Image (tube, coloured by chain):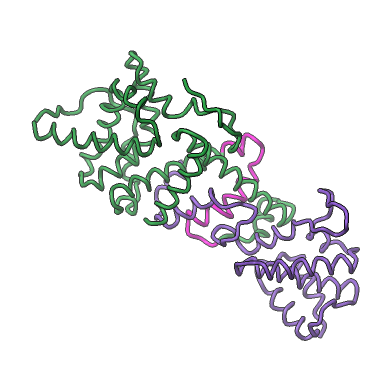
Amino acid sequence: MRRFDDHTSIGGNQQGFDTTHWSLIRQLDCPDENQRKEVANQISLQYWKPVYCYLRRKGFPNEKAKDMTQGFFCEVFIHRQLAQKVRQNQGRFRGFLLKALDHYIIDWHHKEIAGKRSPKQGILLDIDLSEIGELPDKGVELPPEQAFQYAWASGILHQVLENLKKASSDEGLSVHWSVFYAKVVEPILNESESPALAELCSKYGVQNETVASNMIVTMKRKFQAGMKQCIRQYVDSETEVDQEIGEIFQILSKA
Amino acid sequence: MHEEKQVFGLDPERLTRLWKVGIENPSTDSTGETETKDQCLARFLSEKIRMGVGPDTTASPSIHEYLTCSSTGLETLVKIRDWAKELSRKSDNLMEHDAANTIYFLAIAYGIVFHKNKATKYSQDELNQAFNRIAKEKWIPDVYRQLLCRAIIP
């Protein structure tokens, strides 16, 4: 298994690039079907929403898009040959997934035309399809590729916020988290006015505005480190982390 | 999954703003997208500016500490005033410009209140107008609002 020598401690994690989604995908090469299912499940839990958004914007109706989302992860990811292809096709996991999805759609059409598509077979994954109803209209209105990127970025931000909240609690920084969330995150999520620092000091028992501001800076740094750590999971090297962050930002800005 | 529902429900513009939190330098957050004026002011107030010829140490008081204790000397105030004036001149966005100007007037207000010295060419009437205007801003911490009000001389 490859370990990159250019790993840095930026982002605060102590792990190299040997625990990325690429290494997960390589595990799909194993003969044990249950293990392959577990790996596919891990990947699908994180990425089924971008896949579903993409399929919807490709014109597939809701029910069909749901079936195809399941089918994509079951058929493509549990298929043994995928792991072998990955060895020659490393790059960004985001692009890889999108390409694999396009191939799956073509294959799906061919089978549909030939009447060879069998109804729901194989191993069903633990994707909670009930969440599909909560996907935002905005994300589904975008062109297919942008809808995919939108859902992809949403998933990363969700994961970063969840991880940050948990890490803050574990590290005894719950007040930091609350101040950061109230000042920076909540106004964006709720489109509300950002509360004054003095108000937050009073609400969370913070000594003064300077301390509160420093708490926010600390949490922003942790947010950034968390984002890098999250993205590190699906790129090849440390240099690609910043590139990926910048690229997704450009994509979102144009949406 | 409280945040997940909300993050997935964001329009692309807000999602971009949230993504931007992961890009901006948190200590020089100058776009105004995620940092607000009170936060910018607090950031400047937490700075430790060079007061002597020797190296500054982390034990040096911050501007906030100088402006909220009652024993800061006039020479220190002049340094804070000049630092704020330079910061205001160099700022390329309105928020930092306003926050720097506020510190400039806070240093002058402190001089009037504790040293009976206005340390500026501005007339007292002009200062009164500036103090009054800044004191009305909701992003001004109470401790500074009180200082500005005390420096208003009818």
Q: How far across and down, in percent of the image, does residue A181 sit?
A: 57, 50
Q: Quadrant of residue A173?
A: top right
Q: How far across and down, in percent of the image, does residue A77 sit?
A: 31, 27
Left or right: A221 as drawn, with respect to A251: right
Q: Is A85 or A224 nearer to us in this picture?
A: A85
Q: Is A86 or A11 nearer to us in this picture?
A: A86
Magenta residues (range): A166-193
Give the residue drawn at x 57%, y 37%.
A166
Left or right: A128 as drawn, with respect to A192: left
In magenta segment, residue A64: no
Give the residue drawn at x 36%, y 27%.
A41
In magenta segment, residue A170: yes
Q: Quadrant of residue B37?
A: bottom right
Give the residue drawn at x 32%, y 16%.
A33
Q: Is A9 or B65 nearer to us in this picture?
A: A9
Quarter in which the C terminus of chain A is drawn:
bottom left
Question: Quick check: can you spot residue B44?
Answer: yes
Vertical comparison of B105 with A245: above or below: below
Vertical comparison of B19 with B102: above or below: above
- Toward the left, the furthest residue is A114
Vertical comparison of A152 with A249: above or below: above
Colour that chain A carries in the picture = green
Vertical comparison of A237 with A27: above or below: below
Instruction: Give the chain coloured purple.
Output: B
Left or right: B18 as drawn, with respect to A167: left
Q: How far across and down, in percent of the image, does residue A106 sit?
A: 19, 36
